[in-house]
Amino acid sequence: MSETAASGAILVLRKVDLNLETLKGEILDYLAASEFGIFRSVPGSLESLPLVSWDTDTFPDYRMFLDAARKAGQKLILFASREFEEEEILEALDELEGSGVERDEQRQYESRLRAARRYVGSTCMVELAFDYNSHLYVYEARPDWYDQFLEACEEISTLFPGGDDDEDDSHESLGGFYSNN
């Protein structure tokens, strides 16, 4: 197997097998040993700002992102992480119950939402950012299970009469943690 093919296989494995607790510790250790200052920001607090997102699917290595920050002359890196909470599941289930979908479809959604219970307490998001020319450059990592949970929540929010008209309200039901990334 060529080196390129082997590294591609590793990247696919890492995407599927993403353990954010390990990644979070690795990033914090790397930052502590670097010349960067670490500003511990609140998860989700960047959403209303002009953002440029790093392509973590193609370039998942956070060191490449931090190298770009270094080359841009940055000294301060914003760091945030968040644990998945039971409350997110309960709010999504409440929203589902009020949606008026047929019982079979409701059971399917309930099953998808409850499957996320095993991840309660797990890190579901790690975010790095730096400011450059009035834009925040952001590296965000989320595990596949959390993306699937958010996808189910988004689908449920479209079940309400008016669908997209209630979009802002549906995102708030996730405790302000919804991300379009």
Image: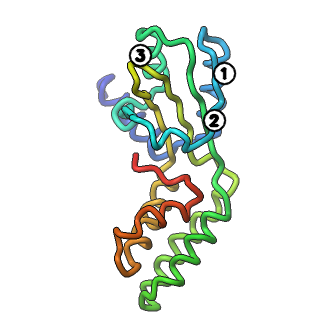
Label 2–label 1 contact, CB within 8 A: no
Looking at the image, residue 34 lies above or below residue 113: above
Residue at the (42%, 87%) spot, across then down = 101
In space, the residues marked 3 and 1 are separated at their CA atoms by 18 Å
Q: Position of residue 69 (x, y in %)?
A: 45, 16
Q: In front here: 40 or 143?
A: 40
**First-in-chain label (3 vs 2):** 2
Of labels 2 and 1, the one closer to you: 1
In the rendered structure, which amino acid carries the disc numbered 1?
Answer: Asp
Q: Earlier in the sequence, mark 2 or mark 1?
A: 2
Q: Are marks 3 and 2 in contact (CB under 8 Å)?
A: no
Indicate which label's residue lies in the foreground, 3 or 1: 3
Residue 166, percent from left and from top:
41, 69
Answer few, some or many: residues within 10 Å of disc 3's Cα (few below 14, many 20 plus, some between 14 and 19). some
Q: CA distance from mark 2 to mark 1?
A: 11 Å
Secondary structure beneath label 3: helix
| Viewer-proximal residue among 114 and 89 | 89
Q: Mark 3 against mark 2, which lies toward the viewer?
A: 3
Circle 3: residue type: Ala
* Residue topped by disc 1: 29
Q: Is residue 55 above or below residue 108?
A: above
Quarter of the image for residue 126 reads top right
- If the image is split into quadrants, where does the C terminus sit? top left
SS under mark 2:
helix
Residue at position x 62%, y 27% from top? 26
Residue at which label 3 appears: 68
Q: CA distance from mark 3 to mark 2?
A: 22 Å
Q: Which residue is mark 2?
A: 22
